[in-house]
Image (tube, rainbow, N blue to C red):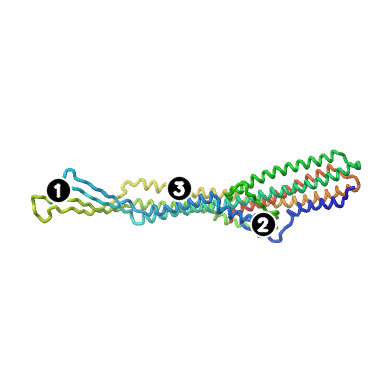
Amino acid sequence: MINLKHINQKRKRVVIFSFSLFTFHFKSVLITAILLCSINSINSQSLDVLVTEALESNPEIQKFELQYKRVSEKVNEVNTIPNTEFGVGYFVSEPETRTGAQRFKVSAKQMLPWFGTITSRENYISSLADAKYEDIVIAKRKLMASVSQSYYNLYANKAKQEVLTENIKLLETYETLALTSVEVGKASAVDVLRFQMRQNEMQQLKDVLSQQFLAEQTNLNNLLNRENNVTVTVVESLMMPSEDFEITTKNLALHPELLKYDKLYQSIEQSELLNQKENSPMIGFGLDYINVEPRPDMNFSDNGKDIVMPMVSVSIPIFNKKYKSQTKQNELEQQEITAQKQERLNTLETLLSKAINERISARISYETQTKNLKQAKDAEDILIKSYETGTINFNDVLDIQELQLKFQMNQIESIKGYYVQSTIINYLIQ
C-alpha cells in the first residue's frame, strides 16, 4: 500500500513551488526604466548589465554615432571661402603701347561671400547634426526596449519549462497512484495509459519551448553583438508589483521621436537664413600684372614699365528665381514637418494608451489566474483525499491537472505581459 501522506507531501511541494512563484508580493516596489522588479538568482545575468553591454557594442548604435560624427564634420567643410583664381596669359601677338610691347599677363582673383554667409552655413550644418543626434537617442531607447522584451521572453519560456517539469513529476505521482489502484481493482490500465500520454504531451511541449528558448537567446545575443551560442541565464522569478509606477503623460511631448521634428524644423529655419545670405551680392578682389618689354629705339622714364592693376568686382544675383523658389520650398517643408510631428504624436499617444490598458489587463489576468489556481488546488486536494475512501476518479484528476497547468501558463504570460508593456511605457515616457 502506498503511503498517501508521503505522496500528498510530495505533491504539495510541487504545487507550492509553482504557486509561490507568482503570488508573493513586495510591500513596496521600485520600478526603474530598465528593470522593473526582479529577484536575481546567483548565476543569472541582470537586465541592466545586458542593456549596458548592448549599448556599448550594438552595431546599429555605432552606425548612428558615425553618421552624427560625419555630419558634424561638415562644419569644417563649409567653413571656407571660394577658391582663389589664378590666371596666366601670353600675348601671341604682342600689343604695342607707348611704353612698350606687352609680353604676358598674370592675374589673381578672390571672391568673398556676403557678411555672415559662412556663419549661416555653419549654423545650418550644426542644426542638421543636432537632428541626427536624436537618431542616436531613439536607437538607444529602442535597443533598450528590444533587449528588455527579449529578456522577459526568455524568462517566460524558462518559467514555463520549470512548470512543465514539476507537472510531469506530479503526473508520475498520479501514475503511481493509478498503478496501485489497478492492483487493488479500483482503476483500469487505461487510467495509467492516460497519465503516461499526458506526460508525453508535456514533454513534447517542454522540448518545443527549449528550442524556442535557443531561438530567442540567439536574438538577444545578436542585439548584444556577440556569438549566437553564448548562454543567457535569466532571473528565477519575477513578481507582480503591488503598485504600478507613476505615468506622466506630459513627458510624451519630450520624446526624442518628437524632438527630432523640432530639430528638423529648426534646421529649415537655418536653411532659410542661409538662403537669404546667399541671395546677397558677393565681393571680389583681384590683381592683374602685365609684363611690358622696353622699346629699344626710345629712352624715356616709363619705357618698359610693367602694368599693375588692382581690381574690385561685385557678383549680384539679379535673376534670383532660384532663391525665391528655395524660400517657398522651405515654407512647405516646415508645414510638412509640423504635420509629421502631429501624426507621430497621435501614434505615440495611441501606443501609450494601449500599453497602459494592456498592462492593467495583465494585472487583472494575473489576479484571476491566482484565484483559479487556489480553487484548482482545493479541488485536487478533495480528489486526492477521496482516494482513501476508494472513490477516486482519475479522469477528474487529469482534468484538474490540465486546468492547473493552463492557469500556471496564463499566470506566467500575465507576468511577462505586464513587464513587456511596462517596457513600452518606459520607452514612451522616460
Residue at image point 40% right, 51% down:
272
Which amino acid type corresponds to the residue marked 3 in the rendered image?
Glu
Q: Is residue 414 left or right of residue 348?
A: right
Q: Secondary structure at mark 1?
A: strand
Residue found 54% across the figure and 56% down from its top: 254
Residue 164 in the image: state x and y as whole percent: 75, 46
Helix, strand or loop status at disc 2: loop
Q: Which residue is mark 3?
A: 333
For residue 398, which quarter of the picture?
A: top right
Q: Which mark is residue 101?
A: 1
Q: Residues within 10 Å of mark 2 (few under 14, many from 20)?
A: some
Percent of width and height locating residue 50: 61, 54
Residue holding disc 2 = 37
**Which corner quadrant holds the C terminus?**
bottom right
SS category of the residue bearing label 3:
helix
Q: Nearer the viewer, residue 121 or 349?
A: 121
Q: On the picture, is 375 further left or further right than 364?
A: right
